[in-house]
Amino acid sequence: MNEEQKKILFKVGELYNKYGIKSITMDDVARELGISKKTLYQFVSDKDDLVGKFIENEIEQRQEAICKCFGEGFNAIEELFEISLFMNKIIRNQNPTTEYDLKKYYPHHFQKIVKARREKMYNYILLNLRKGKEEGLYRTELNEEVIAKLHLSRTENVQSTEIFTIEEFTSIKLFLELLIYHIRGISTEKGINVLEKKIKELEPVTLNN
């Protein structure tokens, strides 16, 4: 992807996040970019194609950001906190209208991002569980596949249930409570000590959010 294409998708992301997808026309995109529709159509065939490229770019960017956490030298527990705080930031900055429009008017693209998100998060959790075992932070007897599915299911259901308000499930406090609940259930004594230390480090963050 060249710089011009990245610029287009960046601007499209800003527009969608601010106004939702349905209300933004190809004319709006061209006008905001200061280009002609003819130039825009050299990049995409129609709005559906534009939405699809926007989704693919979002998936790629999130994957790159999460992958960075695996190369920063964090232990398994620190890694989970970094990824969870990153995902919470994405959700808090996301306009609910964008996801609603995507789900209602572009269900094929919505299913693509749900499938990609689910598969990647499941694999990330598996990698984290295996790393935690090797570091002596997680219990060796736990079933990695079952725990990964349980944590993924719990995380997804928090967002889809009517029990929590939008304000609650986008809050850092809820994200951290969910993560702490997960880590306590899988950790060794060594892991619990690392967790307690991490909780103390994050107290200023939770107090201000």
Image: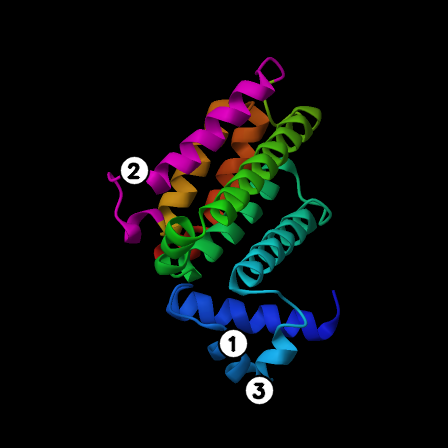
Q: Can you say which quadrant of the picture contains the N terminus?
A: bottom right
Q: Is residue 89 visible?
A: yes
Q: Secondary structure under badge 1? A: helix
Report which residue position mark 1 lands on: 29
| CA distance separating discs 2 and 1 | 34 Å
In the displayed structure, would residue 196 be above or below residue 134?
below
Closest to the observer, 126 or 106: 106
Report which residue position mark 2 lands on: 161
- Where's residue 117, x and y in %? 55, 42
Residue 122: name its quadrant. Answer: top right
Closest to the observer, 96 or 47: 47
Q: Can you say which quadrant of the picture contains the C terminus?
A: bottom left
Closest to the observer, 123 or 44: 44
What's the residue type where badge 1 is placed? Val
Q: Is the residue under label 3 in contact with that under label 1 (CB below 8 Å)?
A: no
Q: Is residue 47 left or right of residue 69?
A: left
Residue 57: name its quadrant. Answer: bottom right
Q: Is the residue under label 2 in contact with that under label 3 (CB below 8 Å)?
A: no
Residues in magenta, as a range: 140-169
Dot 1, how many residues are within 10 Å of its Cα: few (below 14), some (14-19), or many (20+)?
many
The extreme bottom residue here reads 34
| CA distance separating discs 1 and 3 | 8 Å
The residue shown at (34%, 47%) is 169
Q: Is residue 167 left or right of residue 187?
A: left
Residue 55: name its quadrant. Answer: bottom right
- Where's residue 129, x and y in %? 62, 28
Q: State the mark number for residue 34.
A: 3
What's the residue type where badge 2 is placed? Thr
For marks 2 and 1, give the one nearer the viewer.
Answer: 1
Q: Is residue 209 visible?
A: no
Earlier-in-chain disc, 1 versus 3: 1
Earlier-in-chain disc, 2 versus 1: 1
